[in-house]
Amino acid sequence: MVKKEAQFNDIIRKVRKELFGKGPERIQTNFVGNMAITMLSGNLTPTEKFITRTPEGKEMVHTARTRMVQQVYEKAIPEGLEELVGSKLIHLFNDIKVDEDIAISVFVFQDKIV
C-alpha cells in the first residue's frame, strides 16, 4: 500500500504545483476505508508568505487556496487519481492553516480503497 500512497502523493503534488507554481515540500497520505487523508506541509509561495503578514492577507490566502483547490477538483478529477485507488471521487474537503503552513485534504471515494 505504501507504493499506492506515494503515487497518490505524486498526483496531488503535481496538481498543487501546476495550480500555485509551487508544490508542497512534504506530503503524507493515509488511506482509511473509502478516504484518503492527506497532510501537506510547506505549501506557501514566498509571495503568499509576504501577504500573510497581515490578518487581511492571511484571510485572503486562506480563502484563495481553499477555493482554488475545490474548483480544480470540481472542474476535472486529476488524471490517474480514480484509477489509482480504484474508485470514483465523490467529495473533497480541504483546508489550510496559514500560520503553520499546513493543509489537510480529505478525499472521499465511493468505495473502500484497497
Image (cartoon, helix red, strand yellow):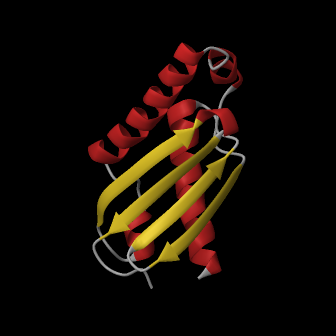
In the rendered view, tell whether residue 101 sits above or below residue 32: above
Relative depth, front residue between 86 and 31: 31
Expressed as whole percent of the image width and height from the top left, the position of residue 26 reads 71, 52
Residue at 47%, 77% in the rendered image: 32
Residue 104 placement, left or right of 86: right
Going by the picture, which residue comes out furthest to the front?
55
Expressed as whole percent of the image width and height from the top left, the position of residue 54 reads 62, 14
Expressed as whole percent of the image width and height from the top left, the position of residue 33 reads 42, 80
In the rendered view, tell whether residue 75 sits above or below residue 99: below
Residue 31 placement, left or right of 108: right
Residue at 58%, 71% in the rendered image: 5
Expressed as whole percent of the image width and height from the top left, the position of residue 86 reads 37, 77
Q: Quadrant of residue 102?
A: top right
Residue 45 placement, left or right of 83: right
Residue at 64%, 78% in the rendered image: 2
Figure disc tally: 0
Residue at 38%, 34% in the rendered image: 67
Residue 68 placement, left or right of 87: right
Going by the picture, which residue comes out furthest to the bottom?
114
Relative depth, front residue between 23 and 29: 29
| Quadrant of image for the C terminus | bottom left
| Quadrant of image for the N terminus | bottom right
